Image (cartoon, rainbow, N blue to C red):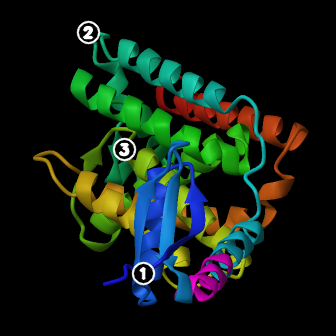
Amino acid sequence: MDLPLLIQVASCRRDRAARELSLLLESRGFQHRVAQGLDGCWEVLVEETEAAHAVAEIEAYRRENEAWTSRLAPHPQRPGAWLGSAWYGLLLMGFFAFQTDPNGAWRAGISDAGAILGGEWWLAVTALFLHADILHLCGNLVFGAVFGFLVAPEIGSGPAWLAILVAGGLGNGVNAYLHAGIQGQEHRSLGASTGVFAAVGIMSAIEWMRRRDAGDSGWRRLAPPVFGLVLLGLYGMGGERTDIGAHVFGFGTGALVGVLIAPVRTRLVGRVSNLAGWIAGVIVFLCSWLAWG
């Protein structure tokens, strides 16, 4: 019996790319196989009678992917994204060193729901920089620096950290209102995790808006917020002392801030970006002075 003649319809440098085309052809019902050639490239082979049709399918698939990629606005180059994360780390460690004060003066900066609703709004911000112990600090230090670094290329380092600070403070404020204003309960909290999840919300919302503006639809557009919600569920809902409300509202206010920033994200460069960073610093200084001055 004569064996069918196989024709090469694609050559890929990487095994992964060849497997991707193999899945495409399999979904279209082509009889094919993948083999590594003498030059080290991976060859996709199809029966001679179906070769022309297979090539057309592969070209159409590649054109579709290229069109989708070109519709997405490229990530702008934002130098110094690491600098904001470095300042974040220094601030958290500096505040933690302040917490070694034997007089316990640092406790005046804890988020107290009753006090916040009574007018001490700055506690919603100062609480972001205080931590219960070294493990609490280290977790928020690492995750906060990483997610802040991921947000910075989208909108600039200064705007990113200003947005995280504002969204984190708003998250603590909403959480305080829920406990004291609606439920009439006492509630105290501290930790940068509200800001960390605010960063996740900002990142999810901006990427969702970016894909929406590109005309994308379906799962590609929904992937960023779904990923953000998965992170919230995995890391924000467990633990004996976890303040779930702070995490949820941090994510929610972050998403809202991200939606508001997304339309102007390409203009947050240069002096505007630097100014946003200075404003964030002034807010931290002002709230600290109001709490401990």
Question: Residue placed at 58% from the left, 59% from the top?
Answer: 11
Task: Give coordinates of residue 57: x percent, y percent.
Answer: 60, 84
Mark 2 against mark 1, which lies toward the viewer? 1
Binning the other alpha carbons within 10 Å of mark 2 as few (below 14), some (14 to 19) or many (20 upward) gives few
Point out the residue furthest to the right here.
271
Q: Residue at x 59, y 66 (%)?
A: 10
Q: Residue 150 in the image: x percent, y percent?
A: 56, 44
Q: Say above or below: 160 vs 136.
A: below
Dot 2 corresponds to which residue?
102
Instruction: Specify the amino acid type for callout 3.
Output: Ser
Q: Is 197 in front, or is 166?
A: 197
State which region is magenta. 50-59
Query: Which of the 4 image quarters holds residue 226?
Result: bottom left
Asked if 6 appears above or below 114 in the picture, the reply is below
Tell which of 101 and 4 is nearer to you. Answer: 4
Q: Position of residue 272 (x, y in %)?
A: 85, 43
The picture places residue 26, in percent across and down from the top left corner, at 40, 81
Q: Earlier in the sequence, mark 2 or mark 3?
A: 2
Q: Is residue 257 visible?
A: no
Q: Are dots 2 and 1 in contact, CB under 8 Å? A: no
Q: Is residue 168 above or below residue 3?
A: above
> Residue 193, which numbered label?
3
Q: Which mark is residue 284?
A: none
Residue corresponding to mark 1: 4
Report the front residue among 146 and 100.
146
Q: Mark 2 near mark 3, Cβ–Cβ under 8 Å?
A: no
Q: Residue at x 33, y 17 (%)?
A: 99
Measure the alpha-carbon separation of dots 3 and 1. 62 Å
What element does badge 2 sit on?
loop
Q: Are marks 3 and 1 in contact (CB under 8 Å)?
A: no
